[in-house]
Image (tube, grey):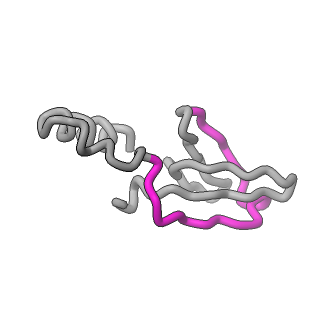
Amino acid sequence: VAREFETHVIETSDRQSLTGIIKGNTPEGILLVDIAGEEHSIPHAAIIANTPLTTSLMPTGLDQTLQEKELCDLVAFLRSLK
């Protein structure tokens, strides 16, 4: 998994567990985008654990169902989200 698409599980002091991709990291906190595309702004002070996962949010085998151009278009789209 490319670093910019690495999935993280963020656990907060109010017992929330959020899974997604870190879109931004500022001195105030991080911006996490979940699988539904919803953005979550999480203050650093509220984060009790930040665990990177070794698996992708992309469903297993999806790349095998796409033609080469479609896969290239998908990767280009994902890169544009940075």
In the rendered structure, the answer to whether residue 63 lies left or right of residue 67 reads right
Horizontal and vertical percent position of residue 13:
84, 58
Horizontal and vertical percent position of residue 79:
30, 44
**Is residue 46 within the magenta segment?**
yes
Figure quadrant of residue 47: bottom right
Q: Above or below — where is 73 with respect to 14?
A: above
Q: Residue at x 21, y 39 (%)?
A: 71
Assign the C terminus to one quadrant of the image: top left
**Is residue 77 within the magenta segment?**
no
User: What range is drawn magenta here?
Assistant: 38-57
Q: Nearer the viewer, residue 22 or 60?
A: 60
Horizontal and vertical percent position of residue 12:
78, 56
Q: Residue at x 44, y 54 (%)?
A: 56
Q: Nearer the viewer, residue 34 or 23?
A: 34
In the rendered structure, the answer to whether residue 73 lies left or right of residue 39 reads left
Figure quadrant of residue 63: top left
Assign the N terminus to one quadrant of the image: bottom left
In the rendered structure, the answer to whether residue 27 lies left or right of residue 48 reads left
Q: Nearer the viewer, residue 46 or 19?
A: 19
* Tally of marks: 0
Q: Residue at x 71, y 66 (%)?
A: 49
Q: Residue at x 51, y 56 (%)?
A: 7
